[in-house]
Image (cartoon, coloured by chain):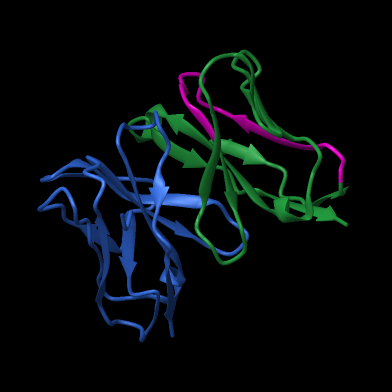
Amino acid sequence: QKEVEQNSGPLSVPEGAIASLNCTYSDRGSQSFFWYRQYSGKSPELIMSIYSNGDKEDGRFTAQLNKASQYVSLLIRDSQPSDSATYLCAVTSRHYGQNFVFGPGTRLSVLP
Amino acid sequence: NAGVTQTPKFRILKIGQSMTLQCAQDMNHNYMYWYRQDPGMGLKLIYYSVGAGITDKGEVPNGYNVSRSTTEDFPLRLELAAPSQTSVYFCASGRDRGRDGYTFGSGTRLTVV
């Protein structure tokens, strides 16, 4: 089983809709969870972090964590064409000294 | 404030050649990392360092070496380049392991032919 799994997409949503991105992880001891956005040809940039079960909101972004189900998600409200990018889920792993393991990413396309 | 600086941005190597990818950060971060990213894939951890003089292997360390003589610099050495090492390499640094997220450099695109 892979450490971190994501649907590769592409996920296409119309402008103004809610985009829902999902991530599952295998290490029950994982403590920190991050979402990074990566535009084509660019480096990843941090957009959200979450450490406790429940929801965390930051502007148009909401991260959701369920440790019992080993599931973390990212909701993007009022999606804009500028949100079109690949979204990487990153989870700390005991197997690698609590460093991050990244999922393969989900490519999001927001259609005008 | 430069953040994390990687050089070079692009490089083409012939099979069997060696090279060093440079990474420097000016944020006084203790934790530094090297990742590689293959097309359509996530980031794979190659090596990491928790401070000067301390390094450890990640998920995919074979064919690479690192050193950390100062807090600021974390070079990645490729010995005997192989086509399988064609990838984009990202260096990252962080203040606290896994807690605040990482700051990434702009990447080095390496092609081995």
| Residue at 58 percent of width and 56 percent of height | B41
The location of residue B40, given as percent across then percent down, is 63, 60
Q: Position of residue A64 (x, y in %)?
A: 66, 23
Determine whether A48 is above or below A15 in the image.
Answer: above
Q: Nearer the viewer, residue A45 or B34?
A: A45
Q: Is residue B8 visible?
A: yes
Q: Is residue B15 above or below residue A41?
A: below
At 30% from the left and 64% from the top, the residue drawn is: B63
Residue A10: in sight, yes or no? no
**Picture residue at 25% right of the left edge, 75% below the top:** B19
Rendering colour (chain A): green
The answer to whether A66 appears left or right of A96 in the picture is right
Q: Quadrant of residue B113?
A: bottom left
Which is nearer the eye, B98 or A101? B98
Q: Name the residue at the front extreme.
A: B1
Look at the image and say whether residue A45 sits in the magenta stretch.
Answer: no
What stretch of residues is rendered in magenta?
Answer: A16-34
Count up the numbered dots. 0
| Quarter location, residue A35 | top right
The quarter holding residue A24 reads top right
Nearer to us in this view, B110 or B104: B104
When the figure is inspected, residue B9 is found, relative to residue B25, above or below; the finding is below
Instruction: Decide if residue A95 is on the left or right side of residue A41.
Output: left
Q: Assign the N terminus of chain B to one quadrant of the image.
A: bottom left
Q: In the rendering, what colour is chain B?
A: blue
Q: Position of residue A2 (x, y in %)?
A: 57, 38
Q: Does the stretch in magenta take in A22?
A: yes
